[in-house]
Image (cartoon, rainbow, N blue to C red):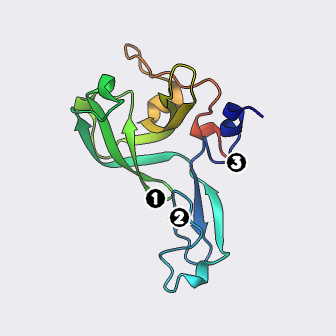
Amino acid sequence: MAIARFWRETPRRYNLGGSRCLVCQSVYFPPRTVCPTCSTHRQSIGKMEPLQLSGDGEVVSYTVVHEAAIGFEMQVPYVLALVRTTEGPLLTGQVVNVVPDEMRVGLKVRATFRKLREEGPAGVIHYGYKFAPREEAEAGPRAGREAEPAPAHSPDVSRARA
């Protein structure tokens, strides 16, 4: 099996796979094997179930990045947000297809998988989740705005539910 195919077929690679504690019903992302919420932690051993997060959420805080980290220089300014998912976990991610001046707390978003970087011209391509305004994630980008291309072989979270 080729390396690229191996990574594409790895469980949760292109999904927001989390876990839920069957004792207290707390949800975690990334997945955990022991629940830190349960009083003795031992209660949750063997009682954590895999859970596919929907990718839907709401922005609870955000910042506009003007001085980018290495590899993101061509994207400034960009929005980095804290998103509370409908299942509960708080995720950090870039919000795409939004003008920074139009960003607001309370914006409904949906996770989408995008190319993050590539290791050399013939290297491994790394994908990860970002967020897009929910209406755009469902209907595509608004007219007049150029969408960030999504990889052809990696599904949108909303279609990748297991």
Callout 1: SS: loop
100 displayed left or right of 127: left
Q: Nearer the viewer, residue 118 or 113?
A: 118
Other residues around mark 3 within 10 Å, as few (<14) / some (14–19) / many (≥20): few
The residue indicated by pointer 1 is: 89
148 displayed left or right of 80: right
- Rendering coords of residue 78 (x, y %): 30, 31
Amino acid type indicated by mark 1: Pro
Q: CA distance from mark 1 to mark 3?
A: 19 Å
* Residue 84 vertical position relative to residue 27 in the rendered view, above or below: above
Q: Which mark is residue 162?
A: 3
Q: Which mark is residue 27?
A: 2
Callout 2: SS: strand
Residue occupying image coordinates x 43% and y 38%: 131
Q: CA distance from mark 3 to mark 2?
A: 17 Å
- Rendering coords of residue 1 (x, y %): 78, 34
Q: Nearer the viewer, residue 136 or 2?
A: 2
